[in-house]
Image: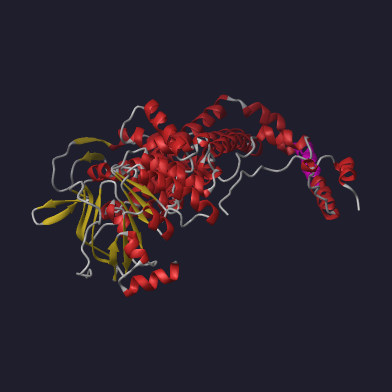
Amino acid sequence: MTVPTIPAGPVAGKREVVLRVTGLKKRFGPLEVLKGVDLIVERGEVMCIIGPSGSGKSTLLRSMNHLEEIDGGRVELDGELVGYRLHGQKYVTLPEKLLARQRTKMGMVFQSFNLFPHMTVLQNIIESPVGVLKQDPKEAKETAMALLGKVGLAEKAQQYPRQLSGGQQQRVAIARALAMKPRVMLFDEPTSALDPELVGEVLDVMKDLALEGLTMVVVTHEMGFAREVADSVLFMDGGVVVERGHPHDVLLNPQMPRTKEFLSKVL
Amino acid sequence: MSTVSDTRSVIGSPDEIRVAHRAHWGWWVLTGFVLLCAAGIVQMLFTNPNLEWNVVAGWFFSQSIVFGLLRTLELTVLAMFFGILLGMLTAVMRLSPIKILSTVAWFYTWFFRGTPLLVQLIFWYNLAALFPTIDIGIPFVGPTVWSGNANQIVTPFMAALLGLALNEGAYMSEIVRGGILSVDQGQQEAAVALGMRTSRALRRVILPQAMRVIVPPTGNQVIGMLKSTSLVSVTSMPELLYSAQLVYNRTFQTIPLLIVASIWYLIVTSVLSVIQYYIERHYAKGGRRALPLTPWEKVKRMFTRFTPAQTITADRRA
């Protein structure tokens, strides 16, 4: 279903492939939300996925760390199949323990932050490094404080999430995901639930991360961010990738009518 | 009209402005009526000779009553402990994607909620009549691993505990399930996205949040259990009420002894309510509002007027 004239894969030069999605299909009941999606994310690349709501972009992102079970195709992280293993000619679901280990390598930031409200900011960040990765609590705390400093919230370490603004909560959520030292960060519309005046502070943090060379996949409606920060932009509609390429090409000089139509509405 | 300094001279600096609640005259009438009724009841309690307060006092700390009370407490604590354990297990099974687990859990809840507790207690007490020996093994298939005399295994105490705990487990399972379902789905997703396994996510993320919903009805269940233990008199277990009955069957001082038992039930219920209060306070951490006041703080508040009600912490998510 992908448009054949557009080459799959990123625009940047030859580097290490971190994430590879091949022929990904997903249906919710009778509704086919992903109709065969291919993409490659290289190390250090920032990929922005844009498109109208219902185009399947969030589902695509959630399939990458197996929050959604997929119905066809595959996702590979560092060459390793995510969520499944090949058993003869069939894919079988991976045992939970192995899936959990794979997920530690992918940081995820949600639209609704999903901080743990019964834990302080610091506890939120060290929970998984200590509990899952078995890091020394003292070291984990130091790392957490450094990360909080980076997102500008060091003084909020002992607060509970509900005492923070949305923008602050999302910055904590980013720090929490980073604390696992992931290979790739997945952002699922990270600023969509924020008041307009709080969007900037979150995007600034994400820009800094991009400059540091973090590999990121960002589902977003922030076209300015995509144009400024992304290495590649992927436009999705109706469960397929309609157009992909360098942000200047896709956003400023789109070739496909559907991309043009979408951009004329949002820009 | 009035200048800022005028206002200050009347009510102090602006940040001290308080809302004064005006009482309605109807409330005063109602308060007077309630006080009058209360006074009537107190007068009756002191003057009615049939209450026989001297008999109440005489039996209050008697050995048979205190032993009965301890039995009641023992049964309540043990039955609730196993009931809560069973309830958590069943709730998690009910929510499991594995069909056989959720079906077994559903059947358990259906059966033990669907039959009267009294019947279940009598059943366990008379188990030996139904199964003289108890064999453990795989039906139809395996050899018997273990075998024992039902009368020796199911003592009256065991029968009471089995009946109460199994019944309680069925109710607790629905309470725990409700609590788990009340936690936002995003919490589970965030936990597994951070590499937690389902069991860890449940223990560290979901259940602590579910507790806020689980604790109040569980407090109800404990108090209900305290009184349900009186049903185990059918297994000839002398708990609090049955102990009182044994006495008045002998002395015919029915009312005073029922008062003795009731006062003890009320005392234990009061203590349990205070415990529940502090448990709720513990799980209110990180909640939308500031921690609720302790009973002592509430008493202090009654004597210091013009303090604002619970401070609401800033919730800036518009």
> In the rendered view, how is the structure colored?
secondary structure
* Closer to the camera in the image, A223 or B139: A223
Residue located farthest toward the left when viewing the structure as drawn: A88
Quadrant location of residue A183? Answer: top left
x and y percent of residue A177 in the render? 37, 42
Region of the chain picked out in magenta, as a range: B37-49
On the image, the x and y values in percent for residue B218 come to 50, 44
Q: Decide whether the magenta segment is chiefly helix, strand or loop.
A: helix
Asked if A164 appears above or below A53 in the picture, the reply is: above
The quadrant of the rendering that contains the C terminus of chain A is bottom left
Residue at coordinates 44% horizontally, 71% vertically from top-left? Answer: A265
Q: Which of these two is toward me, A93 or A144?
A: A144
Tell me the residue at 24%/39% (across/down): B133
Figure quadrant of the N terminus of chain A: bottom left
B219 over A221 or under it: above or below? above
Residue B229 pos. (x, y %): 49, 40
